[in-house]
Every structure is written in C-alpha cells, then in structure tokens.
Image: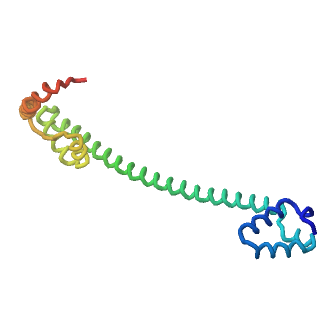
Amino acid sequence: MSPSAFNFGDLLALFVINGLRGRAANNVLEAQWLRPPSTMNRLRLTPAWICAVLVGGVVLSLGLFGMIRGWERRELQGRAANLAHSQVEKLQVSILRSMEVLYSIASLHVADGRLERNQFGQFVGQALMRQPELQERLKKMSAETFGGSAEKTANYMRQEVERWGDVIKAADIKLQ
C-alpha cells in the first residue's frame, strides 16, 4: 500500500514515532502499513467520539464546579448566620441592660419626685460599673469612667487642661 492512500494524521504519526523512538518503531509502523484499510479504521477514533469525550469532560467539569460552588456558598451562609445570631444575642443583652438603666432612672425619679444632679451622677457611675462591655469600649477609646459630684468632675477637667494644655498649644491643635 502506498503512503498516498493514508491521511495526513497517519503520516504525522509515522513521522513522530520514527523521530522519537528510532528504527524499531519504524519497523512496527511499516507492519501497520501492510494491514488492510478496514483494520486501520478500527484502530482510529472517529471525530465524533473525540468530540463526545471532550463534551463529556466539559460537562463533568462544570458539574463538579457547580457542586463545589454550592458547598462553599452553603458554608459561607452558615458562617454568616452564626455571626448574625451571636451579634443579635449581644445586642439583646445590651438593650436589656440599657432598658434596666432607664427603668432604674425612672424609678429613682418617681421615688423622690425630683432628680438632683449628684444623685444622677452617682446613679450613672454605679450603672457604668455594672456594664463591663461598656467599660471595655470606653477603655478602647481611651476614655476614663468615674462617678461623683460636680466638684469632682470640675477638678478632673482642670487637671486634664493643665496636663495636656501645653501639648495642645505646642502642636497647634484646633477643634474641628
């Protein structure tokens, strides 16, 4: 059988095998040249099979991608739900404590019929001491909590002005 009876793919395969494997591969291929054409066609895959395998691989890859994406999405939604649940619980505790303070202020006012500044200051100071979350938040903002009278607050403010006044003037810091 002559080489002109075979297609380009067969000739390319002969060239590659001959170049990569040497003379022994050439002898095997020459034996295949002697086979009848019906035997050669059974050994080759048709383009339809190649396309079917390619399409099947793409479909399986897309299916696997979709499954993994779904798993990731469900896990992310679960994490978000857990975080939201914990934040809601914290908010509920905070609201309940705030409501407790407001009811206590109302009760203090009802009991005496009036609410003096010193009474209110002492009450707020005690209420702040009962709320550790608020104390932590104030510490993070570099705020100090203290309770007491108006005189104590005025003394504290004077001390702070004396302590930081020179620094503020030297840095030329202005209120915005």
Residue 94 at x, y = what percent? 31, 46
Coloration mode: rainbow
In the picture provided, is 166 more to the left or to the right than 26?
A: left
Image location of residue 90, percent across then percent down: 34, 49
Residue 138 versus residue 48 in the image, above or below: above
Q: Nearer the viewer, residue 121 or 28?
A: 28
Which of the 4 image quadrants contains residue 70? bottom right
Location of residue 77 in the rendering, given as x and y in whole percent from the top left corner: 50, 53
Q: Nearer the viewer, residue 66 or 130?
A: 66
Residue 114 placement, left or right of 91: left
Q: Residue at x 18, y 47 (%)?
A: 129
Please identify the quadrant where the N terminus is shown. Answer: bottom right
Compared with residue 163, is residue 16 higher up or lower down, i.e. above or below? Answer: below
Residue at 16% in and 33% down: 115
Q: Residue at x 81, y 76 (%)?
A: 28
Left or right: residue 174 compared with residue 70? left
Position of residue 173 measured from the top left corner of the image (x, y, whole percent): 19, 25
For the residue pair 175 and 95, the one nearer the viewer reads as 175
Left or right of 47 in this view: 67: left
